[in-house]
Amino acid sequence: MASQNLLLLPGDGIGPEIMVEVKKVIAWFNEKGGMSFETDDGLVGGSAYDAHGQSISEEDMAKAMAADAVIFGAVGGPKWDDVPYEVRPEAGLLRLRKDMELFANLRPAICYPALADASSLKKDIIEGLDILIVRELTGGVYFGEPKEITDLGNGQKRGVDTQVYDTYEIERISKVAFELARTRNNKVCSMEKRNVMKSGVLWNEVVTQTHKAGFEDVTLEHMLADAGGMQLVRWPKQFDVIVTDNLFGDMLSDVAAMLTGSLGMLPSASLGAPDAKTGKRKALYEPVHGSAPDIAGTGAANPIAMIASFGMALRYSFEEVAAADMLDKAIANALDKGLRTKDIAAAGEATVSTTEMGDAIVAELDALSA
Ligand code: NAD
Ligand code: IPM
Ligand code: MN
């Protein structure tokens, strides 16, 4: 494998703690998996703000644009509650997504067999679950203008966010969903609120047109997003691929995370369009969860979402499918052996630390390659 450049952005809270564990996995693939990853570190979020007053520096932005993949921890925390809105920690992540044009966010929710009892739902509802949420990531109410608070002059203020979607944005994300569905169970459920939102009407229309123009072999269903949230909890195995907008995708993927036992289990990949010349996509890989300020520094963070996000990098950026499968298997094996961080442990069950879970996954890689 030619040398590949990874930019590591640990961020805040548990971000740096879980990044230590993924570094062990990257080192393992370099030493024993025949790979050649070169890593560089940067600052993002509150840690970048503390260092230079911005949630990401121009230098680190340039490194992210040039990297073969960005591996991102998590940002945010109460320490930065009062910093100006423009430089709040989350702004660094949003800038990375927008400037790198990472419009397709893949959030798989898989229930590992060993964790079928760890969900707050009954075992038969989540056992064998394997769904993929495809979230539009660079449009919608996250980025629409105007976005402002105005003073109405009568003692009242007005907060405005704007949901905007153009045809091309809906078309390209639905194509990603249909293409991925073909590699899975060939079913897409599109979620919007066409009963209330004009952007929902357009979303439904464009997904339907895109389906007709070359994807009719894939089964397409439409659901109102609120009902979709309910169905995700009622009978999640009815879904294969869910395609939805930026805000609904954010909320529905947190719901999906809990089906798998913990927010600490869900990885994600944020992908751009393939480059016209090289075919390479810009990409950022991050866990779905945040910086978990409530457990930062306690050694309780589950590193699996972060490690599995690197697994998605192997799969989607480096075409190392066998290595990605092997890493997923190593995670499953560690869970099968009963290793549990606190978030996935049953009441009274023994727990391991972030470091112990990372080490156990590396040991399983050793065992699998022996
Ligand atoms: P959170 O995801 O950080 O935490 C929610 C709950 O899940 C907490 O109880 C936390 O302890 C638990 N949790 C999360 N990840 C875990 C893990 N790996 N192992 C064990 N438990 C885990 O969400 P929040 O508390 O709403 O947000 C905290 C901060 O994180 C906010 O500033 C928010 O903006 C930010 N955030 C960042 C990202 C990101 O960087 N991608 C994502 C979500 C939230
Ligand atoms: C996520 C997070 C982010 C989002 C925040 C931190 C900007 O919640 O990645 O799910 O809302 O997209
Ligand atoms: Mn979120």
Image (spheres, rainbow, N blue to C red):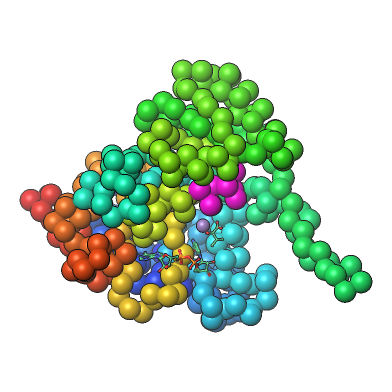
Instruction: Please state the horizontal and vertical placement of residue 166, each as a whole percent of the image.
Output: 70, 38
For image coordinates 33% across by 78% down, the residue present is 298
Instruction: Please state the horizontal and vertical placement of residue 63, each as a whole percent of the image.
Output: 50, 62
For image coordinates 26% across by 48% down, the residue present is 116
Q: Is residue 203 above or below residue 298?
A: above
Q: Is residue 294 above or below residue 38?
A: below
Residue 248 part of the magenta-drawn span: yes
The front one of 351 and 326 is 351
Residue 236 visible in the picture: yes
For image coordinates 79% across by 66% down, the residue present is 149
For ligand 1, the image quadrant comes to bottom left
For image coordinates 57% across by 78% down, the residue present is 80
The front one of 138 and 304 is 304
Residue 214 part of the magenta-drawn span: no
Residue 151 figure quarter = bottom right
Q: Is residue 254 above or below residue 319?
A: below
Q: Is residue 27 left or right of residue 213?
A: left
Residue 281 visible in the picture: no
Q: Is residue 208 above or below residue 45?
A: above
Q: Which residues are magenta?
A: 245-252
Q: Residue furthest right?
A: 153
Q: Is residue 121 left or right of residue 200?
A: left
Q: Residue furthest left?
A: 370
Instruction: Please state the horizontal and vertical placement of residue 160, each as a whole percent of the image.
Output: 77, 58
Prevailing secondary structure class for the magenta stretch in the rendered image: helix
Instruction: Please state the horizontal and vertical placement of residue 23, each as a whole percent of the image.
Output: 30, 65
